[in-house]
Image (tube, rainbow, N blue to C red):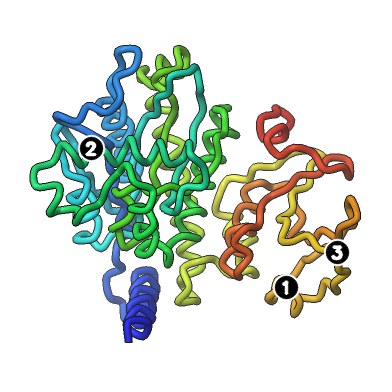
Amino acid sequence: MKTKLLSFFVLAVGLLLCASFTNSNNAPTKPFVVVLDAGHGGKDTGNTKNGYKEAEIALSIVLKIGEILEKNPNIKVIYTRKTDVFLELSERAAIANKADADLFVSVHCNAHHSQAYGTETFVLGLHKSQANFEIAKKENEVIFLEENYKETYAGFDPSAPESLIGLTLMQEEYLDQSILLASLIQNNFTNTLKRKDRSVKQAGFWVLHNTYMPSVLIETGFLSNNDEGAYLNSKKGQQEMADQIAKAILSYQNSLAIATTKSQNPVIEEDEIDKAIETTEEKIYKDVTFKVQLAASSKKIDTKPSNFKGLKEISREKEDGLFKYYYGETSDYHKIELMKAFAREKGYSSCYVVAFKNGKKVKLSDVLNSEDK
């Protein structure tokens, strides 16, 4: 019974998403609602490494993102906070759900005991490493500042890994869309701002778990790093970060709009990827070919679509005694990220992007950090 109810809920959400982008009876089109969440605030200052204040920096970036998005008449921006006030984590999700939001974007700044640096964007999921768990633990511990936290969070313990397992259930239906947005954000940070890419990651953030829409948490950099902390504390740094986050949100909206005009599934269809790319900025790398690696096997499999869950553009190469199976082939990194998201929607949850230069496989990070675009 629960499975049927969940299926009905997902179907209903899909229908609502379609309705929001179509206007069959000349009815007013539902705006694309983005909830912007500035992490911490009030008595919760966040990290204060090097004398910088995370709560203030996150708020400044969020307000700048909102200013950009509000110029688009089809987007409605809602802020969880616009001043230095304390909000409980549960309140933040409630604001987004009450608004029937299409996106929830939470902005933070990182800290570490070393001179670590770089940006990373999180979607909800089980932590894949101790480092991811520690970041989630730090952000979740704000719960202890709240009154009646034991009742509100029903025994949730930010320090216990087992408490994070249940957090993934609500967001599973939106994971692909969350990953797509997170990838667009990271691409902009890396390619345009030349920030170090610490990648898209999964971790158990409470602030993401109770939202009924695609949601991401952005760690814009490390205040504990001397250079990066100064950058994030500057007007220039805050504006540049806001510009690229806003640009990613607009790219995501364009891709989603194309997909949902024809389908209940809010992930873009394969034959619409090129059309989506036309509405967004290209990320072309000279002499580089990107592909999505789907699988590696000792078996030689025919590359016809029926063997790869309907995916077209499948290629096969033998490397180190194994057959590697790839999806897509393009010099546009933005396009290959969309193709990766589509492959994951098809069931290849562990697929990833690889890069080739002059026919030889090279490190993706080296390509993305190069100037050769």
**Most foreground residue, 96 or 142:** 142
| Residues tagged 1 and 2 counted as in contact (Cβ below 8 A) | no
Q: Residue at x 33, y 31 (%)?
A: 61
| Residue 182 position in % (x across, y down) | 48, 47
Where is mark 1, residue-wise?
308
Q: CA distance from mark 1 to mark 3?
A: 16 Å
Q: Residue 237's x, y, as percent?
A: 42, 22
Q: Is residue 100 above or below residue 16?
A: above
Marked residue nearer the N-terminal end (1 or 3): 3
Q: Secondary structure beneath disc 2?
A: helix
**Callout 3: helix, strand or loop?**
loop
Q: Residue at x 46, y 40 (%)?
A: 132
| Disc 3 residue crowd, few under 14, some 14–19, many 20+, Cα 10 Å | few
Q: Are marks 2 and 3 in contact (CB under 8 Å)?
A: no
User: In 3D space, how far apart are the residues under numbered discs 1 and 2 (Cα atoms)?
Assistant: 45 Å
User: Badge 3 is on which residue?
Assistant: 298
